[in-house]
Amino acid sequence: MNSVVISGTGLYTPKNSISNQELVESFNAYVNKFNQEHAEAIRKGDMEPLQESSAEFIEKASGIKSRYVLDKEGILDVDYMHPHLPERSNEEHSIQCEMALVAAREALEEAGRSPSDIDAVIVACSNLQRPYPAVSVEVQAALGVEGFAYDMNVACSSATFGIQAACNAIQSGTAKAVLMINPEICSGHLNFRDRDSHFIFGDACTAVLLERADLAKVKGYEVLGTKLQTLYSNNIRNNFGFLNRCDERGVGAPDKLFIQNGRKVFKEVVPMVSDMIQAHIAEHGIGAQDLRRLWLHQANLNMNVLISKKVLGREATHEEAPTILDTYANTSSAGSIIAFHKHKEGLDEGALGVICSFGAGYSAGSVIVRKL
Ligand code: COA
């Protein structure tokens, strides 16, 4: 069976960033407007007033200080509260394709590769801009890659599931080099009028180039193993689909946007993920003391602190379990790859680490890597 290496990674970060303060100001202006407009019903007790959000709560509960977004104006516009991302003609690149190209080209450059060296493209993310033609096929054509491409969605775990799919193809010989890309426009599925979750997400795109180890031009990281798990849960859900469209702001249909029971997710996913990582490293004869770095999914700082503590048996340093949540927020499947991309240097040859994602489904994925 062919060995697989991660020979390059890439990241697209949108230009605009929204601080907690800016987001909360807009949200609270919406709340005050809503409460004024419904003052009579609220006074009569027919309606509950909406409650204000707070920047302090957001940072304390999640570790998020700001998030990058494709469109700032529409999100902060109290009368719109949704990104302005107009539909494009069939002749233009989709937004996800544009994001993917930036991240993919960076990954190719790091690996010393050109598109002609690649034989498969996987676009793996939580929300696809359209059902078909697959976004991955558009990216494949825009890059000039021969071979095949397909899209896949396992919500926040899409990247680790995509890495396993790429590894399977390379190990079995159906591909030699696979670009696995995660264009996440999370601002498009976020309900910016929902106090419980309006602060959670940001936009970004990551790319991972996986190659047959004996052909790779750079050392990178060897993939020692992947482990995936899914367990059905309604605690993170989005009912949007082609049978039940709503208007683009999701007005009157909040269940067609992201909804979650965050407290339950926190409680149920922390043990699921730490058990999975522990079982995975044990299967490979690796002890917790052998792990140098955990590149965890970036949803909530407190969750990551707990998971790394459970896995390592002690608190992890920032270097051992890096977070990018403060500036990126939750970027769904891109999160653990952003952490890997920004914090993959500084490890000695032979050092072991785990890339791990988790999210809706529930779904969770663990990828054990060794620095070459
Ligand atoms: N501003 C101020 N207060 C807020 C608020 C906001 N935006 N949102 C909620 N609150 C309040 C609640 O009303 C509640 O008040 P109460 O104690 O008086 O009832 C209190 O803060 C705690 O709310 P809760 O929802 O229990 O907060 P939490 O500590 O669980 O944090 C999350 C919320 C979402 C940050 C956290 O649950 C989380 O990150 N969970 C995991 C989510 C996850 O991983 N999801 C995967 C997504 S892909």
Image: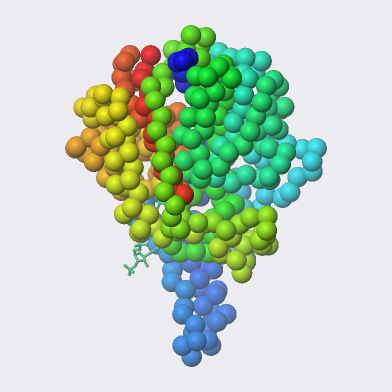
Nearer-the-camera pick, 83 or 2: 2
How many marks do you count on the picture?
0
Seen in the picture, residue 25 relative to 101 is either above or below; the reply is below
Note whether residue 26 is visible.
no
What is the quadrant of residue 229 in the picture?
Answer: top left
How far across and down, in percent of the image, does residue 45 sit?
A: 46, 88
| Relative horizontal placement of residue 213, taking residue 303 as reference (left or right) | right
Q: How is the image coloured?
A: rainbow
- Image quadrant containing the C terminus: top left
Q: Residue furthest bottom?
A: 44
Residue 40 appearing in the image:
yes
- At a point 43% along the width and 62% down the height, the residue shown is 196
Which residue appears at 57% of the width and 80% of the height? 37
Quadrant assignment for ligand 1: bottom left
User: At which x and y percent is residue 339?
Assistant: 41, 33
In the picture shown, does residue 328 fall above or below 33?
above
- Which residue is drawn at the image coordinates 43% and 68% (left, top)? 52
Pick the front one: 338 or 254: 254
- Across and down, in percent, residue 162 comes to 52, 33
In depth, the one of 279 and 102 nearer the eye is 279
Residue visible at 29% across and 47% down?
A: 271
Image height of 99 relative to 27, above or below: above
Q: Give the percent coordinates (x, y) of residue 136.
A: 65, 33
